[in-house]
Image (tube, coloured by chain):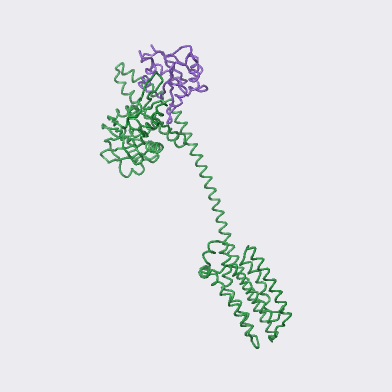
Amino acid sequence: MSSMTRVVTARLGDFVDSFIPPALAADPNRRSLARLFLISHLLGPFLGNTVPLSLLLVSPHPGYDIAVLAASITGFWLFPIALRLGVRYELLTGLSIQNLMFCILWACYFNGGVTSPTLPWVLTIPLLAFFYIGSMERMRTIVLALFAVNIVGFAAIYGLVPPPSNGIPLEHIQILGMISTCAASLYTIMMAVYYARALASQSEIEAEMRSHLVTADNLQRAAADAERASIAKSEFLAKMSHELRTPLNAVIGYSQMLLEEAADMDEDDHVDDYRRILASGEHLLRLVNNVLDLSKLEAGRVEFHKEPISVRRTVDEVVRSLKTLAKANGNTVDVRVDAGAEVMIGDGMMIQRALSNIVENAVKFTRNGTVEIACRRSTGDDGDVVDFEVTDDGPGIPANELPHLFEQFSVADDLTSAKYGGTGVGLALVHRLCSLMGGSVMVDTEVGRGSTFTIRLPLGVAAAPEETPQIATTRGDAARVIGGETNDPKMAVAVNG
Amino acid sequence: MARILIVEDNELNRDMLSRRLQRHGFETVIAVDGPAGVAMALSEMPDVILMDVALGEMDGWEATTLIKGDPKTRHIPIITLTAHALSSDREKSIAVGCADFDTKPVDIERLLGKIRACLPAS
């Protein structure tokens, strides 16, 4: 039953909406006013025509007045069509209210004046006017003026030209009054119910909007909380990593010292043990450094310093820091730096950190093999670049692991993780460092054959190779290459200029 | 024999560094904090100073600035030792007048190279 009501209501709604021109439909406020206007005009003539119909039945000699009344009431059906055809809404509401007043006063004139059974319909005028015009100030004044003019006009005409007697007997007048009042009430109730429903759906929309606002507010707060938690985490990791380094420095330093002393005294049986302590210490240090770097990157505390650097020295420094690990796995590391890729502009420390993670993976996963580091210059879409190609003949990476290779905290799989270890920080760090430096990292790999990782960075040297600065040494504190970088600010000027 | 002043607040680092440098034929003197480092630069007149930067109240940068500000000690080459840092303290080292800088843990061969580069050729 109720589902049928819903279907009828929905059909009626669609039918009503089909009369609303697009210009009105665009404004939700005016659209709801237009809906009330249309509902009233589509259903009104059904109820309104009960009056001329009753008059026809009870009148002993029906006249032209009944025909005019019926025509005027039926004329309300023209208004939706006019609206659809683009006649202005304001004009139509004015005309409609005028027509309504005419119908009511016309019926009153011919059927007893102020005692007419059709008088209760006057009450529908302000109600309908309110439904149609809503908060349109100007229309309110016009409707009020119309109302006054009509009432005064009616009173004047009624006084000057008395209406002809309709000759309806009193008991029939009473029946007519009942029917007319019922129809007017029914009409008013119908419009009020529709209006109440429109209001309810509007407040539903408002309530939903409010709940959306609350949700958005909560989300914003949750995002802020997460941000704060993330910063706290990064700061904790940075502090922790720093604290871990102090004892690590001692472990590495003393084991290096013992190793040197044992080697000097030919205590071969101790050398291997010392080397294991040293390798473990260096391994731990690399892990700590990665966590420290990543947390600094996440906290946005890393600046990118550009200056001329020696590619060869940068790569040598990386190889030097990994020689213990490479040796332990029986790997040899070859370095080749092509002419034209010897000097670049970049952040030496950052390049070293990125390259170091790639080379570390290569010497870690490869056993008794060769790792080749080739640096060459090539011309890409955005100018000259330096490719740091690290090729190993290790196990390679399965294709299904590639999509997540550079994601944080991703290790190949449980098996790899069990065999080789790994925290999933290294390659994520490489990826972030390369992006920060305006470069990229790529991988070409085949299971059983090996992998080639390529770090591609902007060369940064716009000038021709012959303008490459010479690393000059005047006095003790002049230009000197430090771990792959030079500390002479004059050189940066020379290359940039 | 070249004399090296080590300014370092961590006891283990101090001990390890001085023993390793002695093994390579250097004479070492030790300062445990910034003010002591500044005072010993003047009293000991070392050939090279190894300056840790994280030193507590008076840090290595401040001590270096003071040493470089004194006409009697400003000629002494200073190598700063910093913790691992992505954005290196290289620029800061240059700004305060250091000859060079290195990161900890030190690689002895690399550090020796830097120390020798600071010494007058003989």
Q: Indicate whether A455 appears above or below B95.
A: below
Query: Picture quarter containing residue A92?
Result: bottom right
Query: Picture quarter containing residue A120?
Result: bottom right
Using the image as rendered, state which of residue A263 and residue A117 is in the foreground.
A117
Relative placement, left or right, of A93 versus A413 is right
Q: Residue at x 43, y 23 (%)?
A: B81
Residue A175 horizontal/vertical position (percent): 66, 82
Using the image as rendered, state which of residue A219 and residue A415 is in the foreground.
A219
Query: Picture quarter containing residue A405?
Result: top left
Residue A349 horizontal/vertical position (percent): 39, 30
Q: How many marks?
A: 0
Relative placement, left or right, of A314 versus B67 is left
Q: Which chain is green?
A: A
Colour given to chain B in the rendered image: purple
Residue A183 horizontal/vertical position (percent): 63, 76
Please say whether residue A40 is visible from this viewpoint: yes
Residue found at the far right of this picture: A159
Residue found at the far bottom of this picture: A61
Please say whether residue A3 is visible from this viewpoint: no
Residue A180 horizontal/vertical position (percent): 65, 78
Relative placement, left or right, of A353 versus A121 is left
Q: Quadrant of the C terminus of chain A?
A: top left
Relative placement, left or right, of B51 versus A46 is left
